[in-house]
Image: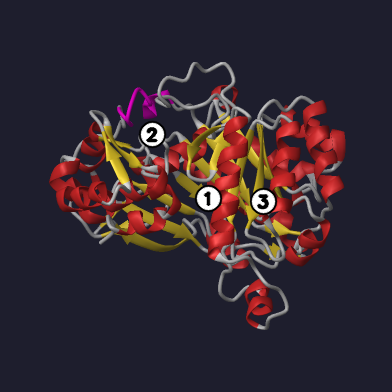
Amino acid sequence: MQTLTETSVYPDLKHLYVHIPFCQTRCAYCDFNTFANREDFMTRYVAALCAHLERIATSQTPPSPAWSSTAADLQPSVPFSATDVAGPLRRADLPHTVFLGGGTPTALPIALLEKVMQRVSTLFPLAQAEVTSEANPGTVLGDEYLRAMRGMGINRLSMGVQSLHDPTLRILGRIHTAAEARASYATARRVGFENINLDFIFGLPGQDLDQWEAALRELVSWEIDHLALYSLIVEPGTPLAAQVAAGRVVVPTDDATADMYERAIDILGSAGYIQYEVSNWARPGNSALSASQILPAYASRHNVAYWLNADYLGVGAGAHSHSRRLRWADERVLEQFAQRVRRGEAPIAETTPLVQSDVEGETMMMGLRLSTGVGYRHFQERCGRALEEAFAAELAELVGLELIERDDHGVRLTERGRMIGNTVFARFLA
């Protein structure tokens, strides 16, 4: 039995996710690991989170997941540098990235959020990093709070707006109005945030194409840097799923939702946004795009690391990590997470060793989400063998169906393939 340590599996840690699992209320559609009305536990949770980060930063042998393997199994077949993704996009070009997600990081009092960031700074050179925090317009506390966030090194905001239609926001259980979302965005701009993402959902209860188009055109007028647009998924066990099953709310059909997606592609494309990933659009900034071979200036570098199937460390209740041939998740329950940290243990609940087919399938599933697709050299370096050797039959079939296309650099989804991306991804998963 060989014990892995966070430091041994991260000789060059570049990407960190920090989970802040608190919300004022739990949204009707949400199935994330979040806790509402737990202000009583915030101080204790932050103390545990910071202690865990400190142990990772300072200890040569911090407690960590155990995995029965030979030492050779701990190394990827070929060192992962992702030097080619259908063009000059390189993992080496990605900066260090930190992402504070949740839950709602801005539900924390500013003093607690500052403690988290002070501890994070011991792991990462924040001045050179892309540092993102999710933010709920209902919990962003005006100029003072936002200026404090900037002062502690956060240079990118990701606001969960979801809709600009107040009745829909109430159905979703959001605690802000459309007017408050506009005001929060304007305040963030005023205090100096130069990189802001807004999350929106389409295919919402009662939503039609005209309502969605009006929202898109308003967003374009705001000159937003980045938009993440997601089709509603009615997750089992959520309050929204119960409402849909009971017939109390009606969601659009799959065809209507597909029409909304296509309308977003048309409107945002006409406004100059680059769709660099299935659900993500960004302004090009000063980047000189050439055949979509590099990222637009305002693309999320942290999320691009995920789509490149890069290694990353996740810390916090329910956070997931991925390194080489191992995936693990921290304890989901707040009290258990804090107790294990206090005992000097790594608060890890489960580990999953990854076999060759996992790495190959996930590299394709994630990479095909990018408009640049999966490069041949990227696949070779990540997986240790050629893409054609791993998936010759699947590639031939999908090219024949006009769902993917190939060139000298790699493979990518066609416009038709993008519309049924999950069907394409499934062909590469064991």
Which secondary structure, mark 2? Answer: loop
Q: Is residue 280 left or right of residue 23?
A: left
Inspect the image, locate mark 2, and give the three-letter code of the amino acid beneath it. Thr
User: Is there a contact, CB below 8 Å, between mark 1 and mark 3?
Assistant: no
Real-space Cα separation, disc 2 to disc 1, in angstroms? 30 Å
Inspect the image, locate mark 3, and give the three-letter code of the amino acid beneath it. Val
In this orientation, which residue lies closer to the viewer: 288 or 55? 288
Res. 366 in view:
yes
Residue 322: percent from left, percent from top = 39, 49
The part of the image, by quadrant, that contains residue 187 is top right
Residue 163: percent from left, percent from top = 73, 52
Instruction: Check if residue 60 falls in the magenta segment.
Output: no
Q: Tag 1: Cα neighbours inside 10 Å, few (<14), some, or many (≥20)?
A: many
Q: Main secondary structure of the magenta part?
A: loop
- Disc number at residue 372? 2
Taking the spot 33% from the left edge, 61% from the top edge, the residue there is 352
In the image, residue 61 sits, relative to residue 156, either above or below, namely below
Q: Nearer the viewer, mark 1 or mark 3?
A: 1
Q: Which residue is mark 3?
A: 46
Inspect the image, locate mark 1, and give the three-letter code of the amino acid beneath it. Val
Which secondary structure, mark 3? Answer: helix
In the image, residue 394 sits, relative to residue 310, either above or below, namely below
Which residue is at the far left? 389
Q: Which residue is mark 1?
A: 315
Residue 371: percent from left, percent from top = 42, 37
Give the magenta range: 84-93
Real-space Cα separation, disc 2 to disc 3, in angstroms? 39 Å
User: Is there a contact, CB below 8 Å, between mark 2 and mark 3?
Assistant: no
